[in-house]
Amino acid sequence: MIDHVSIGVSDLKKARAFYDVVLLALSYMRVHDVDIPGQGVVAHGYGEAGAQARFWIGVPEHVNADANRTGGNHFAFQAKSRLEVDAFYQAAINNGAKDNGAPGIRAHYHPNYYGAFVFDPDGNKIEACCHLPE
């Protein structure tokens, strides 16, 4: 149903460094950069190697981190295993994210829902989740 999503970031270089590491823990990588003549690089797209970008970060008209922290954006990235969820969380914390829920079972979603939640440097809520049993 969704082709791609994009979020605005306050510091594109810092956000790129963060997402390059954090999404690699889930086997996703930066697959596209948008460089507009006269404006420079304005966006980066992430996805599976050799595939279309599905998640984008870019220069917005404005960013409101306070709004993000109080109910703004929430993105969940699919992990192939619980180990990938753990790696995502550790990579995020090590690269400036703030904890919003350490890796673990979230049985209130379903018995095998294993997820981890963080706030990225701009206050966006990001998550990695795995629906498979251990």
Image: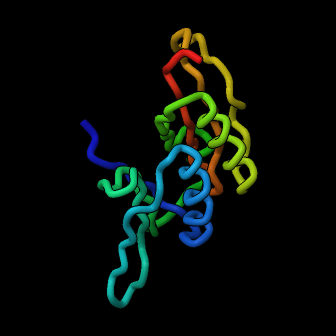
Res 134 quadrant in image: top right
Q: Residue at x 55, y 52 (%)?
A: 24
Viewed as shown, does residue 52 lie left or right of 33?
A: left
Whether residue 124 is situated above or below residue 56 in the rendered picture: above
Q: Residue at x 54, y 70 (%)?
A: 12
**Dividing the image into 4 quarters, which one contains the N terminus?**
top left
Viewed as shown, does residue 40 lie left or right of 36?
A: right
The x, y position of residue 52, in whole percent, is 30, 55
Viewed as shown, does residue 126 lie left or right of 52?
A: right
Is 128 in front, or is 49? 49
- Of all residues shown, which one is farthest toward the left? 1
Q: Residue at x 54, y 15 (%)?
A: 133
Is 49 in front, or is 100? 49
Viewed as shown, does residue 115 lie left or right of 103?
A: left
The x, y position of residue 37, in whole percent, is 33, 88
The x, y position of residue 51, in whole percent, is 31, 54
Q: Residue at x 61, y 40 (%)?
A: 70
